[in-house]
Image (cartoon, helix red, strand yellow):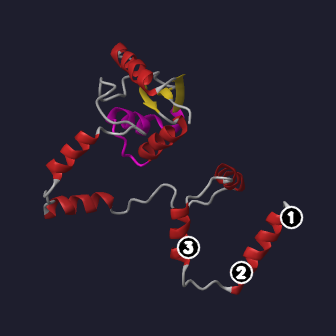
Amino acid sequence: MIGGVYQIRNVQTGDRYVGRAISFARRCQEHRTLLRGGRHTSIYLQNAWNKYGEQAFVFEPLLLCLPDEAIRIEQKLLDRGTARYNLSRSAVSQVRAGEKRDPEIVKKIATANRGKRRTPEQCARMSAALTGRVSPRKGAILSAETREKIRVALAGRPIPAETRAKMSASRMGHAVSEATRQKLREAMLRRNQGL
């Protein structure tokens, strides 16, 4: 994975959001998913996205570097005051994508939340907020090119024995139709013939 410091720049205004990531591609996708769904944590970036549209924004890697150096560089960029879409002016104010929290902090958070119950009003508000929300990829029809990219990315990836056992157990007792068996045979023949 390639990581470092990146920016999301509004090409119409020049305003930007800066951040760091262990994987630029994954972090870019996370931002896009949140922005398209109207749920981005930066209200400034979300409002600008809503106003100018997706086509007005570019995701640009700025520097490839190690995580410790990325924090320092991100902080320098935030200190300059040019990252107008960032809510926080601290590069270490929150856990970012791919980073692990200190186990002591995790324990403190768990202890603080233990035993807390949501009120019926809170549950109703959460339910109302989520009603009708659909995953942006749910039901999407992938192009042949996209399917091929996914196939190539996953080809040769080893599947752990524990995962294989779970997959096998989940299929136990499922009847496979003759049509499906025929499709599987044909796919296996094509694979063996290198087609």
**Front in this rendered view, residue 180 or 146:** 180
Q: Which residue is mark 1?
A: 193
x then y, percent, for residue 105: 23, 40
Q: Report the residue at 50% width, 38% height from top.
A: 28
Q: Is residue 5 left or right of residue 108?
A: right
Q: Residues within 10 Å of mark 2 (few under 14, many from 20)?
A: few
Q: Which residue is mark 3?
A: 168
Q: Which residue is mark 2?
A: 181
x then y, percent, for residue 107: 22, 46
Q: Report the residue at 30% width, 23% height from top.
A: 89
Helix, strand, or loop for circle 1?
A: helix
Asked if the residue under mark 3 is in contact with the one under mark 1, i.e. CB atoms within 8 Å, the reply is no
Tell me the quarter of the image containing the C terminus: bottom right
Q: What is the three-letter code of the residue carrying label 1?
A: Gln
Helix, strand, or loop for circle 2?
A: helix
Q: Is residue 15 left or right of residue 11?
A: left
Q: Main secondary structure of the magenta part?
A: helix
- Quarter location, residue 117: bottom left
**Residue 46 is covered by the magenta coloring:** yes
